[in-house]
């Protein structure tokens, strides 16, 4: 009579389980155990026993899910670093602007006359620029103020969900 819980296909080498592991070590360990289980269960081909097949599929699914989540975490770390870089650059911009808001706008949407500190602007002799005419709209800088209705109309979208010609 065989003992309960005895594995018919013993693992080739014992797996040492460390008492303490870092996050990365724990992931690597569990992935290694999953790969070992799959490798041992598939040594003789795909098992014919339904429970063995379920075990292999479960180990593979967990392996894939862990790998995908680890990749997502790596990408999110990169995004976090990018966000930190943008915030740092914004701090430098504000310092350059002598603590003035570089995005401030007057009620009509135009930039206030004292918007940019003259200390950081180059001194340009406008007489050396020559005569030039602005094309209509060329001098407009900033966001255009428009209502949602005019935007939808310009884009050909009916907010009720129907097409422009409906």
Image (cartoon, rainbow, N blue to C red):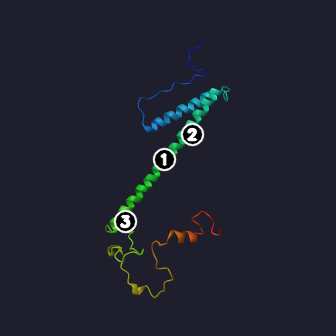
Which element is circle 3 on? Answer: helix
The residue lying at 35 percent from left, 65 percent from top is 94
Residue bearing the label numbered 1: 74
The 10 Å Cα crowd at callout 3, few under 14, some 14 to 19, many 20 or more, is some
The residue lying at 51 percent from left, 46 percent from top is 72
Between disc 1 and disc 3, whose residue precedes?
Answer: 1
Q: CA distance from mark 2 to mark 3?
A: 43 Å
Q: CA distance from mark 1 to mark 3?
A: 29 Å
Between disc 1 and disc 2, whose residue precedes?
Answer: 2
x%, y% of residue 164? 63, 69
- Name the quadrant containing residue 99: bottom left
Are the two marked residues, 1 and 3, in contact with CB atoms closer than 8 angstroms? no
The residue lying at 41 percent from left, 31 percent from top is 20
Which element is circle 2 on? Answer: helix
| Left/right of residue 82 with respect to residue 67 in the rendered view | left
In this view, 163 is above or below 128: above
x%, y% of residue 24? 46, 39
- Quarter of the figure that contains the N terminus: top right
x%, y% of residue 60? 59, 35
In this view, 8 is above or below 87: above
| Left/right of residue 86 with respect to residue 152 in the rendered view | left
- Quarter of the figure that contains the C terminus: bottom right
> Would residue 43 be seen by someone viewing this image from the given angle?
no
| Label of residue 93 in the image | 3
Q: How many marks?
A: 3
Residue bearing the label numbered 2: 64
Q: CA distance from mark 1 to mark 2?
A: 15 Å
In this view, 150 is above or below 30: below
Near-viewer residue (166 or 61): 166
x%, y% of residue 28? 49, 36
> Would residue 123 be seen by someone viewing this image from the given angle?
yes
């Amino acid at each position: 009579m065989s003992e309960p819980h005895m594995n018919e296909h013993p693992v080739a080498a014992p797996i040492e389980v460390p008492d303490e592991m870092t996050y990365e070590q724990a992931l690597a360990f569990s992935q290694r155990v999953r790969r070992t289980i799959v490798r041992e269960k598939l040594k003789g081909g795909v098992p014919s026993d339904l429970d063995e097949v379920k075990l292999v599929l479960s180990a593979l699914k967990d392996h894939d899910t862990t790998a995908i989540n680890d990749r997502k975490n790596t990408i999110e770390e990169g995004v976090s670093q990018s966000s930190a870089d943008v915030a740092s650059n914004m701090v430098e911009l504000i310092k350059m602007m002598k603590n003035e808001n570089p995005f401030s706008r007057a009620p009509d949407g135009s930039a206030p006359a004292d918007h940019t500190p003259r200390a950081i602007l180059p001194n340009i002799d406008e007489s050396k620029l020559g005569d030039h005419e602005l094309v209509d709209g060329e001098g407009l800088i900033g966001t255009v103020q428009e209502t949602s209705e005019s935007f939808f109309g310009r884009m050909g979208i009916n907010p009720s969900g129907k097409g422009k010609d409906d």
